[in-house]
Amino acid sequence: MHRIGIISDTHGLLRPEVVQALQGCEAILHGGDINSAKILDEVKKIAPTYVVRGNNDKEWASELPETVSPKLYGLRFFMVHNKRFIPQDLADIDIVVYGHSHKYEEKYVDGTLLLNPGSCGPRRFTQPITFAVLEVEEDCSFQVRKVEIAHTKKSEGITDGNEDFMEVRMKGRDMKRIIKSVMRDTDKGIPVSEIAVRNDIDGELAELICRLYLTHPGVSADGIMGKMGL
C-alpha cells in the first residue's frame, strides 16, 4: 500500500502534528497558499512534493505552476488552488485536489473524487484544522482518511496568528455589523484593501467576506457568518 499526504493552505505554518502525521508518506500534494519558500522546503524534506501556486503565494512563488497533473501509483491527479478553475472535462482524472476555502470537502462527480483537504495552517475562525492521507492499494483502489488536528492555543510554542486576531482584536466587536458594512462597500465597488481600512479589519478577513458575498448571490449577513463558521 502507498500513502500520499494531501495538504493545503499552510499559510506560513507547518504544525509539528502535521509533520509527524505525514511521516511514511511516499508523496505529498499541496493545494497552494504555502506563503513561504521555507515552508515548502520543510514539506519537501518529508517526501517528494507536488504543489500549485495559491492566490497568497506572491513573488517568491512566481515559478510555481497554477495547475499540476501528476500520475502516482496508477492514479491520475489534477491539482489547482481554487475549485473555480477545475476543468469541466474530468474523464481522464481520478482525483482532483484543491484548497482555498479552508473547508474540508470530499465528493464524487461522475466517478472523479473532488478533494479539498481543508487547512492545516493557521486556524480560520472556528473551522477545524484538517488534511488528508490517501492510501492506495496495488490494484489502484484507494481510501481517503481525513485527519483533524485538535485545536490548541499553542502547538509546541507556535501561536496561531489567526486565533489571536479573532480572539483579541475582534473581541467585543459586532461581526454581523462589520459584515453588513463590507457588503455595502463591495456594492459600491470599493477595493478590498480600502474596505479593510474603512472597517478596521484584517485584509484577509475583508477578502473572505467579499468573496463569500460575491460568490453567493442573495446571501445575507447571517448566511456569510454561517459559512465562516461563526
Image (tube, rainbow, N blue to C red):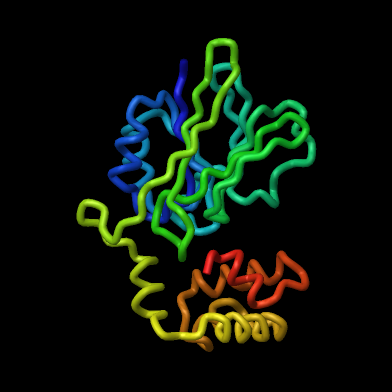
For the question of whether residue 123 can be seen, the reply is yes
Instruction: Identify which residue is drawn at 46% across, 42% down.
Output: 131
Indicate the position of residue 173 as horizontal and vertical percent values.
Answer: 45, 85
Residue occupying image coordinates x 33% and y 30%: 23
What residue is rendered at 52% in x and 69% in y?
230
Query: Percent x, y for residue 149?
Result: 38, 47
Q: Is 102 rendered above or below residue 214?
A: above
Residue pictured at 38% horizontal, 43% vertical: 40
Q: How many numbered marks does the figure carry?
A: 0
Q: Farthest residue to the bottom: give it.
A: 198
The answer to whether residue 230 is left or right of residue 44 is right
Identify whether 145 is placed above or below 187: above
Front residue of this view, candidates 101 and 220: 220
In the rendered image, residue 214, in percent from the top left (x then y), is placed at 71, 70
Picture quarter containing residue 26?
top left
Q: For this view, does 9 lie left or right of residue 164?
A: right
Task: Please tell me which residue lies in front, 61 or 48.
Answer: 48
Rendered location of residue 160, percent (x, y): 33, 61
Q: Quadrant of residue 91?
A: top right
Q: Residue furthest top?
A: 139
Instruction: Say whether residue 66 is visible.
Output: no
